[in-house]
Amino acid sequence: MPFTLHMRLARLALAFATLFTVFFLAGCAQIPRAAAQDGLKNDFWTGRISLQVQSEPAQSFSASFELKGRAERGELTLISPLGNVLGVLRWSPGEAVLDSGGGKVQRFASVDELMAQATGAAVPIDALFAWLRGDNAAASGWSADLSRQKEGRISAKRSQPAPQADLRVVLDQ
């Protein structure tokens, strides 16, 4: 991993860790779901997301988010408790982009590669979209707990491959 990418990820991890406490105290503004032109709801979710990776050193990310699209093509915006955009991840077939602001854009071959580089754990995007819809999709090495999905709460744990990871999503209701 290039030194500058490593430093940027380290700073992002530090920012998330610092905001972790503030995140739970600040609360988040609720953003209404967008309606499609045909009157149906778009694939759009808002809420809070956290990912803890048991790497050495351990990494912890937590932020408000807006997620739109589908597993094949979408956009994830991470937002601080103060409303600042921390980063935007965009993906489509054959390409994934991390825009961390200030003209700093990184390109990856896939969303899986982007997530692995940005968080230290490859988050299963296909399964995440299914879990958000309440479908208990299988993802290699991951086990999801959707028992509180109707309340807008999803958790998933990755046991293999190492490092272990714990993903939690709380949707705005």
Image (cartoon, helix red, strand yellow):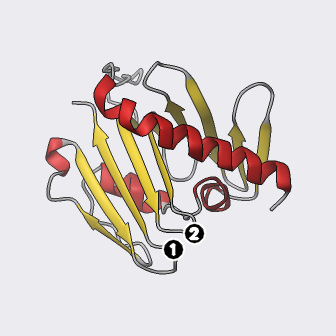
Q: Which residue does the image show at 47% across and 68% down from the upper left?
A: 54
> In which quadrant will I find the C terminus?
top left
Q: Which residue does the image show at 52% across and 78% down from the upper left?
A: 162
x and y percentages locating residue 81 in the rendered image:
42, 25
**Residue type of the residue flagged with mark 1:** Pro
Secondary structure, mark 2, is loop
Foreground tag (2 vs 1):
2
Q: Nearer the viewer, residue 115 or 32?
A: 115
x and y percentages locating residue 114 in the rendered image:
66, 55
Task: Indicate which disc residue 98 carries.
Answer: none
Vertical side of 36 occupied by 88: above or below: below
Q: Where is mark 1, residue-wise? A: 163
The Cα–Cα distance between marks 2 and 1, rounded to whole angstroms, is 9 Å
Circle 2 crowding by C-alpha within 10 Å: few under 14, some 14–19, many from 20: few
Toward which corner of the image does residue 116 lie, by quadrant? bottom right
Toward which corner of the image does residue 135 lie, by quadrant? bottom left
x and y percentages locating residue 46 in the rendered image:
37, 32
Marks 2 and 1: CB-CB under 8 Å?
Answer: yes
**Residue type of the residue flagged with mark 2:** Glu
- Counting residues from the start of the chain, the first of labels 2 and 1 encountered is 2
Q: Where is mark 2, residue-wise? A: 56
Secondary structure, mark 1, is loop
Q: Left or right? Give the position of 44 relative to 103.
A: left
Q: Which residue does the image show at 64% across and 46% down from the upper left?
A: 91
Residue 74 in view, yes or no:
no
